[in-house]
Amino acid sequence: MKITFAPRIALVVAATIFLHLNATAVEVDLGTANNFAVLAGSAVTSTGNTVVNGGNVGLDPNTLSSITGFPPGIVNTPYIIEAANGVTLQAQADLTTAYNVAAGPLTHVNLSGQDLGLVGPLTPGVYFFSSSAQLTGTLTLDDQGNPDAVFVFQIGSTLTTASNSKVVTINDGPNPTPGISVFWQVGSSATLGTGTDFEGNILAYASITDDGGSTVQGRLLAETAAVTLNDTTITVPPAEEVGGGGGGNVPDSASTLPLLGFGVATLFAFRRRFISLA
């Protein structure tokens, strides 16, 4: 029996890369939760002149009586306020699915114990906090010119931003859509400090609170508890695809080149065995 070595190289290297990418890639699809700027489980409350652009305000399982502060808060047309119906029920189910997907990748950069304002610029990938995450100052996200760049932040408990903190995207291509592919998976609750300028979709297991005057380019989505707004301005980025919520492949923080090298090295290590079968 004769085995050709070159095709074996191509096969094993391709398999190595394929397995690596499929083990570490994740697509965060918000499903019908994509249609909501704000989604909560127990209540949505607004104080002052909150403005919601580009998405609905929804609540489930509680009813419309648990959505307060609109007016004076405004949800700009054609978007609406709705609760405890088939649409909000499905949106909460899709949010749970998206939350679990975002929490899933095993390969990540561990930032536990570090302030997000001191670690940037960050490149696309998955970033992990074993418990709480803090943002003081400015976090810079570098898309590296990739229009499909995705960031996932996995936070074990709470996300808290200091007053006047910022999330800023750079190198995001000719048609930037801030926040579209940034996902914050929060194990309990998120709190935005006064005047925070925030980008991304917060997927919180419990609650989300704005202390006042924050600007959000993204979505505030809470599974079980309340979303509390206070002179908050929310602008929802458009979906990348029908029924989707932004998203795409999240690259591993490591390059594929080491995997390519590993595949080739593995083949050469077993080269004699291949040749002996010729």
Image (cartoon, rainbow, N blue to C red):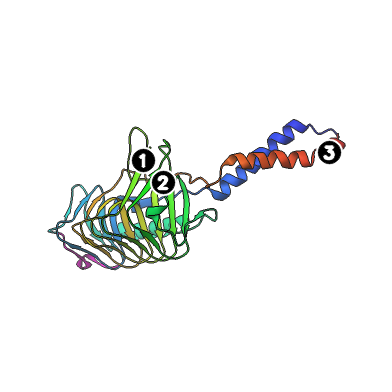
To which residue does mark 1 refer? 170
- Region of the chain picked out in magenta, as a range: 61-70
Q: Are marks 1 and 2 in contact (CB under 8 Å)?
A: yes
Q: Are marks 1 and 3 in contact (CB under 8 Å)?
A: no
Q: Which mark is residue 40?
A: none
Q: Is residue 214 magenta?
A: no
For the point 48% across and 44% down, the residue is: 249
Comparing labels 2 and 3, the label whose residue is closer to the camera: 2
Callout 1 crowding tier (Cα within 10 Å): few <14, some 14–19, many ≥20: some
Disc on the earlier residue, 1 or 2: 2
Whole-number angstrom distance, CA of label 1 to CA of label 3 = 49 Å
* View extreme (front): residue: 118
Q: Position of residue 33 (x, y in %)?
A: 34, 54
To which residue does mark 2 refer? 121
Q: Position of residue 165 (x, y in %)?
A: 29, 54
Give the residue type at disc 3. Arg
Disc on the earlier residue, 2 or 3: 2
Q: Residue 137 or 46: which is nearer the viewer? A: 137
Give the residue type at disc 2. Pro
Callout 2 crowding tier (Cα within 10 Å): few <14, some 14–19, many ≥20: some
Whole-number angstrom distance, CA of label 2 to CA of label 3 = 46 Å
To which residue does mark 3 refer? 272
